[in-house]
Image (tube, rainbow, N blue to C red):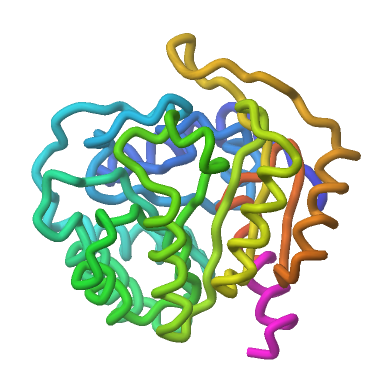
Amino acid sequence: MEKKRISLADLDLLKKSFKQSGLHTVCQAAKCPNIGECFKNKTATFMILGDICSRNCAFCATTHGKPLDIDEKEPQKLADTIKNLGLKYVVITSVTRDDLPDGGATHFKNVVDTIKKEIPDIKVELLVPDFKGDKKSIDIVLSSKFEVFGHNIETVPALYKFRKWADYNRSLDVLSYAKQKGFITKTGIMLGLGETEDQLVEVFKDLNRINCDILTIGQYLKPLKDNAEMVKEYSQEEFDYLKKKALDTGIKVCVSGKYVRSSYFAEQTFQIAEGNLNL
C-alpha cells in the first residue's frame, strides 16, 4: 500500500479540528506511527469515553488514572465530524472504563446508532475493551449496527504481565462470543516484547479455533521512556513469514508489517475480508 506524506500545516489543521470538536483520536493519544499517513487520507480512529484509561498497560502511551465523566454529546459531535470529513469508513475505539458499571457499552451503542442515523451508508468498525468479560455489556454493543467487531489480543499469554488487569482467555472469549453472534471479528498482536515463534503459533491456532476472521501483526515501538522496553525489532521478511504461519493455521485475513496497527488501512482490510468471506 502506497505511503502518502502530509504537510505539517495540514496535519496541524486536522488536529485542531478534532480538538475544537472536543474529540480524541487514538492516533494522537497512543502516538501511532501512521498518524501522518492516515490523516493525509482524512481518516482516523476515534477514541470515545475520554482519553484517560482506568488500566495501565506497560506498552501503551495513553494516559491512565481516574477517567472523566462521559460526554453525553459525544455521539452527535462524532457524527457531525465524520460527516464533515466525508468519511465512508470509520473505526471507533475507547479507553478501558472499568469505573463504569457497563464498561461504557451503552455509550458505544449510542455512538454507533447516532453515526448510522446521520450517515446511513457508512461502514463502522469497533475496537472495544474486554468489558471484564461481561456478556450483558457485550450484548449491548452487539445490539447496534456495525460491520466489524475488534478486540486486541495484544501479545502472547506468557507476556500478559504487560497487560494490567487483562486476561488472555477472557479476550479470546470476547472475540468468540461476537463471532457466535454473526459478526466479522478482528484482533491485533504486537511483536517485540519477548515472544517466541512457538508462542505466536499457539496464539494463531487459538484465534483460528474461535474463527477470528482478521489478524493484524505489527511491531511494538516503545512510545514513552516509562513504557516497556522493545526486546526485538523484526524484519519485513519475518513479518511475512509469520503472516504465512498465521494463514497456514486457517486465519482468513492477515496483515503483517512493522507499522501495521489494528486500525491501519481498516477499510481496505475489511474489503478484503468481505471478499474472502463471501459476505
Determine the image quadrant of residue 190: top right
Closer to the camera in the image, 141 or 230: 230
State the residue at coordinates (46%, 61%): 172
Using the image, determine if residue 95 lies above or below residue 114: above
| Magenta-drawn stretch, dominant element (helix, strand or loop) | helix
Determine the image quadrant of residue 186: bottom right
State the residue at coordinates (39%, 77%): 119
Measuring from the top left, give residue 205's x and y in whole percent.
66, 61
Magenta highlight range = 268-279
Measuring from the top left, give residue 199's x and y in whole percent.
66, 43
Q: Is residue 218 magenta?
A: no
Furthest toward the bottom, the residue is 278
Closer to the camera in the image, 148 or 212: 212
Using the image, determine if residue 241 lies above or below residue 30: below
Using the image, determine if residue 134 lies above or below residue 70: below
Closer to the camera in the image, 104 or 204: 204
